[in-house]
Amino acid sequence: MNFYLLTLIKMALTAFVLLTCCAYAVWVERKVLAHIQLRPGPYRVGPHGLLQPLADLIKLLTKEGIVPSYANPFFYLLAPFLAVALALSAIAVIPFTPEFELFGVRTAIGLTDINIGILFLLALSSLGVYGIAIGGWASNNKYSLMGSLRSSAQMVSYELPLAMAIVSPLLLVNTLNLREIVELQSGFYLGFLPKWNLFALPVPQALAFLIFMIAAFAETNRVPFDLPEAESELVAGFHTEYSSMMFASFFMAEYANIITICCVATVLFLGGWHPLWPAQYGSDLVPVVLLAGAGLILLYHAAQAARRRKWDRFTFPVFGVLLLALSPVFLVPMLKPVLIPFFWFVAKAGFLVFVFIWIRGTLPRYRYDQLMRFAWTFLFPLSLANLLVTGLVVALAG
Amino acid sequence: MDVLLFLIFAGIAVGCALNLVLQTHPISSALSLIGVMGSLAVLYLLLGGEFLAAVQLIVYAGAIMVLFVFVIMLLNAGAEKRPSKKVLRTAVALPLLFTLAGVVAYILATQAGRTETVKFGAYVVGPYEIGKALFTTWLLPFEVTSILILIAILGAVVLARKEI
């Protein structure tokens, strides 16, 4: 019974954390985009707009959900549910930390650990297209239909290079279980270079990582491949007709997909929870130094706060003291084997999420024929060639 | 637990299959087919064929059916008209249907010859075993099938070219 209770608690926690991360990913995205474009971004709701996600949620909850009279109501309502359910369930197989003992039960942060983890993720991502396709079709609107047609063609095309890019690191680790994949990437070459698949010795998978990330942008419909919702051509693409929480579901699904695919990239290529350099050179101190540094910077700015921003005098010290108080937690010997790996995992996945946002602020959108030509005549042959070379070297080496 | 799950998903599979035939709109039928494939994947999983279950979802539900749905949406196919309902036709067809089902069930039950029931999780077959079987024992049929599919693709391209 202990197992079921623990699983239930973990499910609730994971869902809560993932949904909060989705909401705050929107805030981070708006802030980063704003700073790229030299403007402050959300600033009114809470200190530095920190309560903006909550305000957005209340706004979306209280809006009227409209079903167009000419739409197919069953499929129209099914589509956002499908999109968000598939997007959220993918997080279940991601292993965030190594196993540890908790009240006599061996467990880990991360819900489940299945033999075919990576195939499960591929299956969910290939089913994810239905939410968008059905939603656009059921809206009975030309723009929505164009958006969902583009999206299905794009996602089917980019799934091939994505799968091929996943297969080549799998050849190195020889397992489909995500936890084993991470565990096999432990250790360091020459005492400092991590044995991640990105640098793995017979054939470094840097090219596969690049292909994976490019395909991931297309799979999540992000800039520069966001043609399904190209504002300048299709109003808002497949979710033109959606309002209220149905619209929010599509939005949540998009951000959950981004977070999941960044976690998958971390597991497959960046060594999951393994640190960037060995612990004997002080990689365990990184979270402490980062948190304490951030706290001190906040305290310094609290003293210097501009006169116009009255709230900063109050909120900066509070957050600064909070961060300073949090930093020694990473030094507690009992919590260390959980928190340090978890920190490294979140840091890597978080950096990849930042890259997603960074690219959205930097690159323009592709034209549709360029997108297709790029997938079929460049990315797919390249991923095949990478797979062939990897397979050949692995076969020769052992 | 296993029996319960089997009954639930077998029920869903049959229900979706019936819905596939009864629906008039092609999109509804296509989505019912996806439901059938999804529940079949769960049945494979119950038997222990985890790799097969995942591939069933990735290939059939995730790739082939997306193309089906894509084509239906692109052609903008509307709902079919039902043929007018006649009591006499139904009265003849229903007994015939049940007779057919009964005959098939009888033949299967007598010819299969095995009486023990399938055990859940009896055939745990991972990707390793399947890969080994495909590339050693069944190499020739496997390659011949791939070439057959390649020929089909080339044929489709040639046929489509003529129309341009």
Image: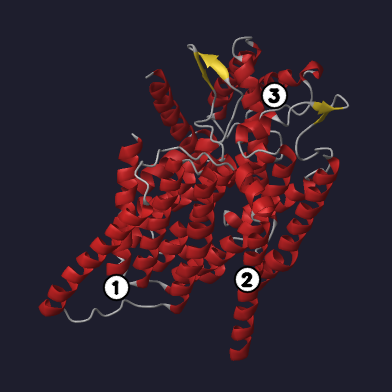
Q: Are marks 3 and 1 in contact (CB under 8 Å)?
A: no
Image point (37%, 47%), residue name:
B114
For mark 3, does the 10 Å Cα neighbourhood hold few (<14), some (14 to 19), or many (20 or more) residues?
some
For mark 2, does the 10 Å Cα neighbourhood hold few (<14), some (14 to 19), or many (20 or more) residues?
few
CA–CA distance in space, label 1 to label 2: 34 Å
Quadrant placement of the N terminus of chain A: top left
Quadrant for residue B90, please give it. Answer: bottom left
Where is residue A348 shown, x and y percent of the image?
67, 35
Image point (72%, 19%), residue name:
A284
Q: Which mark is residue B24?
A: 1
Image point (82%, 52%), residue name:
A389
- In depth, the one of A83 and A390 nearer the eye is A390
Quadrant placement of the C terminus of chain A: top right
Chain ID at mark 1: B
- Residue denoted by label 2: B148
Please report whichever mark, 1 or 2, sits nearer to the chain's N-terminal start: 1
- In depth, the one of A15 and A111 nearer the eye is A111
Which label sits in the foreground, 1 or 2? 2
**Left or right position of A249 against B151:** left
Q: Are marks 1 and 2 in contact (CB under 8 Å)?
A: no
| A241 over A262 or under it: above or below | below
Residue B48 appears in the picture as rendered: yes
- Residue denoted by label 3: A290
Where is residue A52 shown, x and y percent of the image?
47, 40
CA–CA distance in space, label 2 to label 3: 59 Å
Q: Amino acid at mark 1?
A: Thr
Chain ID at mark 2: B
**Coloration mode:** secondary structure
Residue A44 appears in the picture as rendered: no
Chain ID at mark 3: A
**Left or right position of A279 against A90:** right
Secondary element at tag 1: loop
